[in-house]
Amino acid sequence: MTTTTTARSTSASRGGSAVGLTDLHRHYGPVRALDGLTIELSPGELVALLGPSGCGKTTALRIVAGLEQATSGSVRIAGTDVSGTPTNKRDIGMVFQAYSLFPHMTARRNVEFGMRMRGKANPKRAGEMLELVGLSTESDRYPHQMSGGQQQRVALARALAVEPAVLLLDEPLSALDAKVRVQLRDEIRRIQLDLGTTTLFVTHDQEEALAIADRVGVMRAGQLEQLDTPTDLYLKPTSGFVADFVGTVNRIGAQVHDGRALMLGAEAPILPGSITSGPGVALVRPEHLTLVAADDGNGRVILSTFLGATGRTRVTLGTGETVNALVPSHLVEQLSPGTHVRVTLRDAALLVVPTP
Ligand code: ATP
């Protein structure tokens, strides 16, 4: 959290826009891969583009890279329209899902080659970049002598060695196993903050996006559904789509009246984007429900699962609705199936959407 705040205030203090995508459209016959995408990245900011398969994330990144032409719209890097500029003349570094290293070159040679291609050969810097990604002792290894995570570090060093104005990352972690993925994700963030490189990071993994980004843009059908800080995206989703895609939600019937949602025998403030009155469906995070055993409660436990640090309990409410609540793991044994419970709402603002 601290680092994120630092990055954001740094970006804000530098001002201006480092990268601007304006009203981008990309049509493939009848398919609208992008349908009016506009995003501005501040200098030094890391924005993650998140969304379901086929929503246009990769297309957006490829257009910024110059690997794909937009049907209409423009891309600016550091204030200059680069829509007609070839990839190798754009001031960018790229890392893709596939490691894409030259197999016959050592790690160091791979990094040096990337710099030579841009006319920025500098063996000392190649060494420094490999050190930055934690590979100083592996620099003379060939790709086949390195793990997937190490190869992706080399690809990152190669992309950053040319000191690009913009770093483009397209699912760079998806070929790695879960543990390496988290380690490298944190490393990428550390390095990006160190160097202050403006970065666009494409992923379909919500945890990855929330963990790494200053702001996350959730895309849907070629458009931006919501662009916000991770905290606001999670706690203040503006649509059911975002609430569902980022984290999990329970759907509980509610009445909206005077800017408040009435449900589970209590009242909660409502978020912008909610219906303004009448019956609707409140979207409630599992951690915003509390459970206590009570014979005269409003629900009955169906299943309790011990998950180590936490537990999850599934409850059928008197209304017939089923909800999941996050519970302290030491309560899991007490909340066995059949237990009558009282389900209440913690203090949280809720999005209330129309009843389907
Ligand atoms: P994923 O997470 O699966 O990689 P994505 O969000 O990156 O998906 P894109 O690869 O940008 O999605 O694709 C967006 C849409 O455009 C999809 O419907 C895809 O099938 C379509 N599309 C992409 N490239 C082409 C192409 N060259 N020809 C035709 N359709 C394409």
Image (cartoon, rainbow, N blue to C red):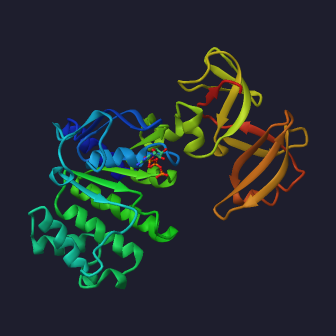
The residue drawn where x is 16% and y is 61% is 162
User: Residue 322: which quarter of the image?
Assistant: top right
52, 156: nearer the viewer = 52
- Total number of numbered discs in the rendering: 0
Residue 90 appears left or right of 146: left
Q: Residue 61: where, in percent of width, then height?
A: 34, 48
Q: Is residue 28 above or below residue 125?
A: above
User: Residue 39: which quarter of the image?
Assistant: top left
Q: Residue 65: where, in percent of width, then height?
A: 27, 50
The residue drawn where x is 59% and y is 25% is 270
Residue 195 appears left or right of 34: left
The residue drawn where x is 90% and y is 51% is 338
User: Residue 25: which quarter of the image?
Assistant: top left
283, 223: nearer the viewer = 223
Q: Residue furthest front?
A: 29
Quadrant (top left/top right/bottom left/bottom right) for the C terminus: top right
Residue 353 appears left or right of 37: right
The residue drawn where x is 24% and y is 62% is 159
Residue 214 visible in rendering: no
Q: Residue 43: where, in percent of width, then height?
A: 23, 43
Q: In this view, does 165 lie above or below 240?
A: below
Residue 285 visible in rendering: yes
Q: Residue 112: where, in percent of width, then height?
A: 16, 72
